[in-house]
Amino acid sequence: MITTVCLNPCFDKTVSVDRLLPGQVNRIREARVDLGGNAINVAVVARRLGLEAQCLGIMGENGATELTALMDHEGLTHRFLTVPGGHVRTNMKVYSLDGQGVTELNEPGTQVTESILQEFTRIVAEDTADSDMIVLTGSLPPGCPEGTYRDLINALDGKKCILDTEGRELELATKGADPFLIKPNLREMEATLGIELRTMRAIRDAALIFVRLGVQHAVVSMGAMGAMYISADKTLFAPALRVETKSTVGAGDAMIGGMLLGYQIEKNMARAFRYGIAAGAASVMTEGNQPINRSDFDALLDQVRVQEV
Ligand SMILES: Nc1ncnc2c1ncn2[C@@H]1O[C@H](COP(=O)(O)OP(=O)(O)OP(=O)(O)O)[C@@H](O)[C@H]1O
Ligand SMILES: [Mg+2]
């Protein structure tokens, strides 16, 4: 069983306008609402790839029925604490059809209290008894203290945790806890360390800073460039697969889902890396935040070329 932890779920609202005009009335052409939140996305990908996955989290009371219905529709097993009076946030992606790109407007999420977080920590520890891997990813809602991910990992007491976060949360969690795997993208890695990483050697050395702190595996993703895998004794690079790109939203989440499947099959993270590359590529082949298709993933897996650096 895989557990993903979703502290700040959302509705992903995607709208399109002919041309986005700031400071003016913009008429929406098309709108759709999907299930969102990185941890929910990872659980959805894991399920699409045939893994058993559950999502544990916290959500506002208003919108909880709709969010729950969307998770049920995906067949996800879930357990969420609801915050009385809170609301499930909406993250909006505005596509400007004139080619200006996508503008994102993200709400902060519902305010959580210390007592809710304590109750949630207890639930996570209790409900992960049968989980071999726990994924912690996504932004933290207002009210979460610094080091929330570190504290959750420590409460999981030796369970293998995959952490996808950046900045201060990544720093605190790697100094004060031992995640099994971290998956920053290159920009997040640079922002966390406050340095530019221009060569593969520089990226490897940067990842090794985290490995020395106790992280067992680091995967640094680089979008259409591919990704690197770094552990104490191995560095790998895989170029991204050339696929028709419909939307790069959610590629990182899909990559984690792929590596979860790979680890279950291979029992080895270095060998699981190529499953992540295939899942990331399968994800950009689908529109918007649509989950990957298993058939795309299967067709891509054999095409991944991993080289030792
Ligand atoms: N355009 C692309 N073509 C092929 N593969 C891609 C493309 N974009 C991403 N991927 C694959 O997916 C992996 C993860 O993508 P990326 O580095 O963009 O993650 P991310 O920045 O964490 O994404 P997210 O927006 O989901 O947080 C990449 O390492 C790559 O293997
Ligand atoms: Mg990401």
Image (cartoon, helix red, strand yellow):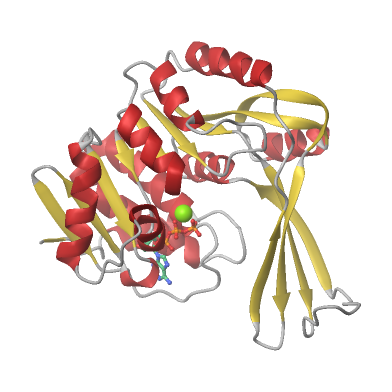
Compared with residue 98, is residue 57 higher up or lower down, i.e. above or below? above
Q: Nearer the viewer, residue 284 or 149?
A: 149
Q: In the rendering, at what x and y percent does residue 6 appear?
A: 58, 35
Quadrant of res 24: bottom right
Closer-to-camera residue (79/300): 79
Q: Which image quarter: residue 59?
A: top right
Residue 298 visible in the current orientation:
no
Residue 166, compared with residue 122, is above or below; it is: below
Inspect this view and state whether residue 288 appears.
Answer: yes
From the image, which quarter does the C terminus lie in? bottom left
What residue is shown at x 62% (from left), y 21% (from top)? 117
Quarter that holds the N terminus: top left
Residue 245 at what x, y percent from top left? 49, 74
- Name the residue located 67 percent from the left edge and 15 percent from the top edge: 115
Residue at 44% from the left image edge and 57% from the top image edge: 295
Which percent across, then down, holds residue 191? 40, 58
The picture places residue 58, in percent across and down from the top left corner, at: 67, 28
Total numbered labels: 0
Q: Is residue 108 above or below residue 155?
A: below
Is 193 on the left-hand or right-hand side of 266? Answer: right
Residue 257 in the image: above or below residue 304? above
Q: Nearer the viewer, residue 57 or 131?
A: 57
